[in-house]
Amino acid sequence: MQPSELSGVIADHFAAVNGQDTDAIMATFAPDAYVNDARREFSGTAAIRRWVARELVGDKVSVEVLEVLEHYGDTIVRGAYDGEFDKTNLPPEVILSNYFSVRDGKIVSLIVIFNHEAGY
């Protein structure tokens, strides 16, 4: 994996999330994209829009990008998340890994995972 800078549609995506702009967030996704967030899958723009409206914009989520890695054409972004979401049983700093696949300038898949250290 190679360290990288945030750019293109992924940079647009995080700017839109931090700007709480549903339409701008949706403009970063391909029409047949899918999102998997916390083991829940949202497929297509209607389902993704409901997720964005409720869990990103609705919960006033903001993300501070901490690390960007390129891996065989995909991009992994680790970010510190904050907002009005339920933080029960979460650590004081919530770091999530975002796994992006981009084709033709649009996000075709996004997987968001709360990773844990392997411990070995």
Image (spheres, helix red, strand yellow):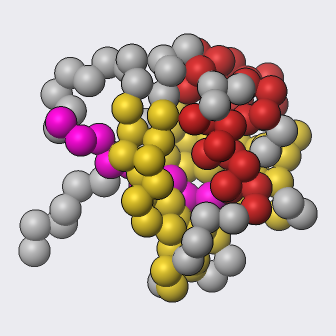
Front-lying residue, 50 or 94: 94
| Drawn side of residue 94 relative to residue 5, left or right | left
Q: Which residues are magenta?
A: 92-100
Place of residue 107 in the rendered image (x, y in percent of width and height, measured from the top left): 75, 52
| Drawn side of residue 34 relative to residue 80, left or right | right
On screen, residue 27 above or below 10: above
Place of residue 90 in the rendered image (x, y in percent of width and height, measured from the top left): 21, 33
| Drawn side of residue 90 relative to residue 1, left or right | left
Place of residue 64 in the rendered image (x, y in percent of width and height, measured from the top left): 44, 47
Residue at 57 percent of width and 35 percent of height: 18
Place of residue 11 in the rendered image (x, y in percent of width and height, measured from the top left): 67, 55
On screen, residue 8 above or below 85: below
Residue at 68 percent of width and 37 percent of height: 16
Residue 90 falls inside the magenta stretch? no
Front-lying residue, 34 or 68: 68
Residue 67 can be seen, yes or no: yes
Residue at 48 percent of width and 34 percent of height: 62
